[in-house]
Image (cartoon, rainbow, N blue to C red):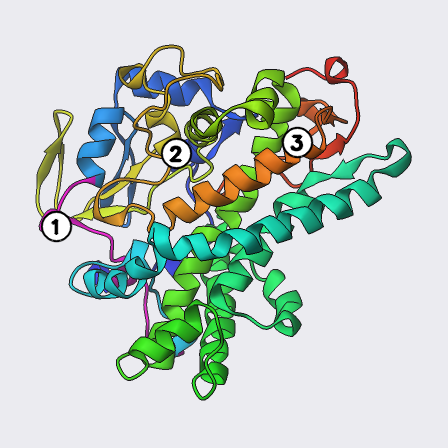
Amino acid sequence: MRNGIDLRKLRFLPESVTLPLKRDGLDPLPEMMKVQGEAPVKKLAELFGKSVWLVSGYEESREVLAGGAEVWSNDLGQFVSQEGRSDEEQIGGLGMTDPPLHTALRRYLTPEFTMRRLARLQPGIDAIVEQRLDAMEAAGRDGRAVDMVEEFAFAVPFDVICDLLGLPVDDRARFLELGVARFDLSGGGAGAFGAAAHTREFLINAVREQRENPGDGLIGALLKEHGDELDDVTLGGIADGVFLGGYETSASMLALGAYLIATTPKAGEMLRSGDGEQVNQVIEELLRHLCVVQLAFLRFAKQDVEVGGMLIKEGDAVGVSLLAANRDPALGEDLGTFDPSREPTRHLAFGWGMHRCVGAELARMELRTALRMLAERFPNLAMAADIKDLDFRKLSAVYGVEALPVLLDGDRESVSI
């Protein structure tokens, strides 16, 4: 553990470093965009004797994200004491490891996320979405408001990720309880690390149970193909990384995406009647505009490095605001607005470089299917509350909303953005 720093002991985040985690509704705070315009690479604070930097310019963000392992480390474990910790409590996952471990872990996962292998999931995704839409229709009879978060946005990706991993139906209720706290940083590092231990423990136990009789999902496939190479803890950690990257993020995208569809008639029409290219346009614009993963995994400088004309010293921490970078005028014009017909940009919603999300194509598949089918089933979907009355997460690495009441056959003009 470098310099005796233990992030587990951090009970709250200093106010100065919370700027990229705060929003005004769906938008970055005006202060955030002002920082980007004046100082796309800005020193935010001193923490544990090291500087904490925020990178928010598009080109500067890509430069950091594409930087090699000789310059940047993603190894968060070096700043977290592992002494006395169980296997379940160790730090891991693709986003928080460096080569050669990162390279080895990604080698196991990449073949499972090719377009050819993902195609086998499409019928299951179609069925899951259809079931959730049926349940929503039943809940929304007689003009009753339906909570999109509970009935649709969390239910769809949860079932998809459980099917992908190959988790038995009987285990899913307990697994569902463990998700949201993973990304809540309101209690500093302590709460998030504690929640992570519970999900890792659950998935490590799932691996142990399947080792003798592998299931049909990702866990079973990796046991069949690489069981002799992967112990239970390592494979459980890989499964946890898939869950970490594919559940909460998709749930938030579906909820906030449904909000924009309900308040942007053009988006719903393009999803219902547009060709594949138009549907993709809507999805890419949603990814860019919402960018629910607000901040990339922290990078730590392994040597002095200059970014955007600023000298970042060895050992300093760097956070990249993916949301702000996706609104940078360098990427295009009028990016503060949601325009479903915008030509897709080279946005950073999935990150960039060697740590780019391995499940990006699965996420796109899920969003295309779920939002298209939602728009087709409920063409008059409308909000049942104003955006100012919604309860958005205050300090979360993955931005989202706690509830999203909608009317399935409502009046679009009754509620404003």
Residue 56 in the image, given as x and y percentages of width and height = 30, 27
Q: Between 334 and 410, which is closer to the camera in this rendering?
A: 410
Task: Read off the residue under disc 2.
Answer: 16
Q: Which residue is mark 1?
A: 302
Q: Is residue 234 above or below residue 343?
A: below
Of all residues shown, which one is farthest toward the right? 142
Measure the alpha-carbon separation of dots 2 and 3.
Answer: 44 Å
The vertical placement of 187 against 34, above or below, is below
Amino acid of disc 3? Glu
Residue 401 lies, in percent from the top left, at 61, 38
Secondary structure category for the residue under label 3: helix
Residue 151 left/right relative to 301: right
Give the residue displayed 63% in from the left and 53% down from the top.
Answer: 128
Give above or below for 408 relative to 102: above
**Type of amino acid at the residue the image marks with label 1:** Lys
Cβ–Cβ under 8 Å for marks 2 and 3: no
Predominant secondary structure, magenta span? loop
Please tell me whether mark 2 sits on a helix, a strand or a loop. helix
The image shows residue 390 at horizontal and vertical percentages of 68, 31
- Which is nearer the N-term, disc 3 or disc 1? 1
How many discs appear?
3
Left-right relation of 33 to 171? left
Q: Which residue is mark 3?
A: 376
Dividing the picture into quadrants, the one containing residue 295 is top left
Residue 78 inside the magenta-drawn segment: yes
Q: Is residue 196 left or right of residue 410?
A: left
Q: Nearer the viewer, residue 327 or 55?
A: 327
The residue under the point 65% across, 35% down is 374
